[in-house]
Image (tube, rainbow, N blue to C red):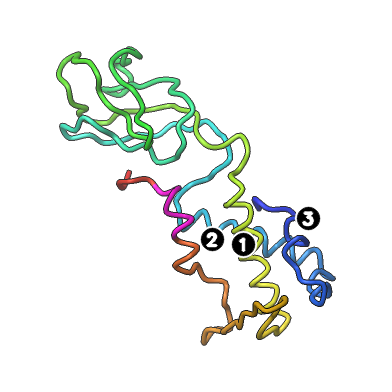
Amino acid sequence: MAFATIGDLVDRVNPDEDALLDNIELAERLLDESADLIRAETGQDFAQATSTVVLYATGRRLLQLPQRPVVSITSVVSDEGAFTWPADTYRVTPDGQLERTRSVGGWCWWGPVTVTYVHGYATVPADIVRLNASLALTMLQDRAGVRSASLGSASVTFLRSASGEIATVTDDHRRILDRYRPLVAP
């Protein structure tokens, strides 16, 4: 599912490129494809949801939760459900890590830890919406055979890869997406 709407895409189209939006079904599919590319690059779903994950700990004080931002923790369970961690024995760091804060059987996490938590954004961040629309527009321009575009004194030239696809994530895009990646691998 796309983060951006057809309206967001229309806002990015130059007046001389209106024909790009003649096929709304194609535009919607490319919005979905570019959103999938963003998800793949960040490992994030962005939409707010509840997830249950099993994290394997070997004496670490911090466990990286895979989805950010963490809104709330519902439960933290160890020993295949035999022990539920009290809420005052852990906290969530700003970067989405579950940190032990009080010793109950030690300061570190051990074995499989099952965490149920709410994560994601109530509203997808504006820079992700813009990037979704921008990538989809690039894909539309490529399919329409557009090689360059200009607006006033600014212009851009699009290059095709050997496969004909140009919707790749650039270094500029990665700088935006880096803010949403977990700091360490989950």
- Looking at the image, which residue is at 60% across and 82% down? 158
Mark 1: amino acid: Glu
Question: Are dots 2 and 1 in contact, CB under 8 Å?
Answer: yes
Q: Is residue 1 visible to us here? A: no
Residue nearer the viewer, 43 or 58: 43
Region in magenta: 175-181
Q: Which residue is mark 1?
A: 33
Element on which disc 2 rests: helix
**Numbered badge on residue 7:** 3
- Quadrant of the image for the C terminus? top left
- The CA distance from mark 2 to mark 3 is 20 Å
Which of discs 2 and 3 lies nearer the camera? The answer is 3
Residue 116 is left or right of residue 48, and the answer is left
Residue count near mark 2 (Cα–Cα under 10 Å), binned few <14, some 14–19, many ≥20? some
Question: Are dots 2 and 3 in contact, CB under 8 Å?
Answer: no
Residue nearer the viewer, 1 or 52: 1
Residue 185 percent across, percent down from the top left: 31, 47
Residue count near mark 3 (Cα–Cα under 10 Å), binned few <14, some 14–19, many ≥20? few
Residue 140 position (above or below residue 148)? above
Mark 2: amino acid: Leu
Residue 12 position (above or below residue 100)? below
- Looking at the image, which residue is at 42% across and 54% down? 178
Question: Are dots 1 and 3 in contact, CB under 8 Å?
Answer: no
First in residue order: circle 1 vs circle 3: 3
Mark 3: amino acid: Gly
Q: Which residue is mark 2?
A: 37
Residue 125 percent across, percent down from the top left: 58, 45
